[in-house]
Amino acid sequence: MSASEEKEEAIPEGIDFSTFVVSLSHSALLHLGEAPHPETDKPETNLLLARQTIDLLGVLEEKTKGNLTGDEERLLTQVLFDLRMRFVEVQKKAEAKK
């Protein structure tokens, strides 16, 4: 099996709102250094990209108010809370190293 075929198998066919939110959440975790980079398998921190992804989820929350199921709304709220708290912690650690 080729690498492109493996990637196609790993991508779920039915993308829904929850999958989208979890995907963005994983990207933010990757940029916060909380998940290993897929190419290097080592954590890498990029606070600018983490902040951008978290802000994007915030915009999504704002623009979808009143249009989500209860489960979708809870997922988005919890993901945002968790990512914002992690961001603050990583930012504090980065500032302490300066």
Image (cartoon, helix red, strand yellow):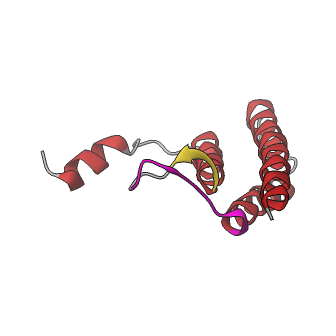
Q: Between residues 37 and 13, which one lies in front from this camera angle?
A: 37
Query: Horizontal placement of 38 versus 83: left or right?
Result: left
Query: Horizontal placement of 57 versus 37: left or right?
Result: right
Which residue is outermost to the front? Answer: 98
Quarter in which the C terminus is drawn: bottom right
Whole-percent x and y of residue 15? 51, 45
Task: Give the quadrant of residue 71.
Answer: top right
**Residue at (42% x, 51% y) in the render:** 38
**Residue at (58% x, 51% y) in the render:** 30
**Residue at (66% x, 53% y) in the render:** 28
Compared with 22, 55 (above or below) is below
Whole-percent x and y of residue 88? 85, 51
Quarter in which the N terminus is drawn: top left
Q: Between residues 64 and 38, which one lies in front from this camera angle?
A: 38
Q: Identify the magenta region.
A: 40-48
Query: Horizontal placement of 67 versus 27: left or right?
Result: right
Whole-percent x and y of residue 24? 62, 52
| Residue 47 sits inside the magenta stretch | yes
Whole-percent x and y of residue 72? 74, 37
Which residue is outermost to the left? Answer: 1
Query: Horizontal placement of 32 versus 79: left or right?
Result: left
Compared with 89, 75 (above or below) is above
| Residue 5 sits inside the magenta stretch | no
Q: Between residues 75 and 50, which one lies in front from this camera angle?
A: 50
